Image (cartoon, grey):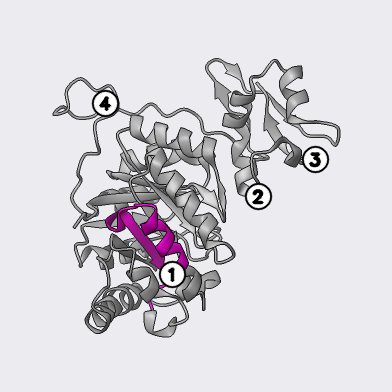
Amino acid sequence: MNELHGKGVWLQYSGDVNLAIEMAVAIGATHVLYKTGQGGMFFVESARQVNDRLRKAGLIPLAWLAFSSDDPLAQASVAVKSARLGYEGLVFVMTEQAGGRGVAAGALGHRLLEEGLDPQRLYYASYPNIWQRKDIPYREMNRFCHGGFMPLCFPAFQRTARTVIHRWAYGEHARWSQEWGDMPPLYPVLTACRDESGSQPLTAPEMLEWAEAVAEHEPPFFSIHRADTTPRELWPILAAMGERKPARPPVGASAPSAPPPAVPVEPPAPAAGAPEAKRGSAPAVYHVVTVNDTVWSLCQRHNLPPEQFWEWNGHLWEEHGLPRDAVYLQEGWRVRVG
């Protein structure tokens, strides 16, 4: 069995990759889980760039996808492309949209196995209170996600940490493992927020309560959801959890046995409306898109290679669930052009 070991940090937008790396290094994480697509759309350029950045930092990249029941075969294609690009595992997030979609989940699994993906490297994340969410296709996911089950142990359930983690996550996992006989290993997912939007962060005492509840079970692997919604003041609590295992040596390290060098963290690509970042000594240059602008015209005007434009601004398309196509450039967006 290919068990996970260490800690993971979830990353939703490629523009936050530097923050995710900084957080991973600070808390002693080994893995970063990045959203490589939406539905049947694969974020090919950002997926490649994030994979490269994580590997250079000595971190292990895993891909995650929100389960899409509309076209499970297209989503299977995204998963296969992510694996071929170098992501070492795929996590499918099964929430409300997965309810009653057992046939779609089964079709997804069938196609993934047909494509030769290793079921030991397939995982799924969903609600920990299984007995209350029998509409979620847990059993169908168990048939091909042999790598692990990642219960979302979130305060948004408005229950205590002990209830969500001890009674629900671990208690339900034990119950259904015995009844079904095919539950994969359990790897809990924590969050530092009270709400799903991430606008209400936990205090340090609250975070400590959740961290201690998970630590009682000594999981071989746990993860935190997400880098951009986890306040820095809570990082020391996560750093103290579990055994601190060094990540893989950064690419190019000459002595694998030596501690990995500090990871240089460049300013992340800014979201719309974010304060200006700096690249070297020169300030970054931004442009507010007008109705007459195109990606081509902006690149021509600012002598900017299209590849650089997408590296700086591709996260805007991802955040809106759009393919990286110039026709989707929207009026009012603030894009970096220099």
Callout 1: few (<14), some (14-19), or many (20+) C-alpha neighbours within 10 Å?
A: some
Callout 2: few (<14), some (14-19), or many (20+) C-alpha neighbours within 10 Å?
A: few
Circle 1/circle 4 CB separation < 8 Å: no
Give me the C-alpha separation between circle 2 and circle 4.
Answer: 36 Å
- 46 lies left or right of 225: right
Specify the amino acid type for callout 4: Pro
Residue identifier under label 1 = 106
Give the residues in magenta.
Answer: 106-129
Position of 1 relative to 180 (above/below): above
Q: SS at mark 4?
A: loop
Residue identifier under label 4 = 261
Residue found 76% across the figure and 33% down from its top = 288
Callout 3: few (<14), some (14-19), or many (20+) C-alpha neighbours within 10 Å?
A: few
- Which of the two marks, 4 or 3, is nearer to us in this view? 3
Q: Position of residue 307 (x, y in %)?
A: 59, 25
Report the disc number at residue 91: none
Q: Position of residue 18 (x, y in %)?
A: 45, 35
Residue identifier under label 2 = 320
Position of 319 relative to 205 (above/below): above
Q: Quadrant of residue 39?
A: bottom right
The mark nearer the N terminus, 4 or 3, is: 4
Quarter of the figure that contains the N terminus: bottom left
Residue identifier under label 3 = 331
- Please state which of residues 266 and 220 is positioned toward the viewer in this rendering: 220
Q: SS at mark 3?
A: loop
Circle 1/circle 3 CB separation < 8 Å: no
Circle 4/circle 3 CB separation < 8 Å: no
Give me the C-alpha separation between circle 1 and circle 4.
Answer: 44 Å
Toward the right, the furthest residue is 292
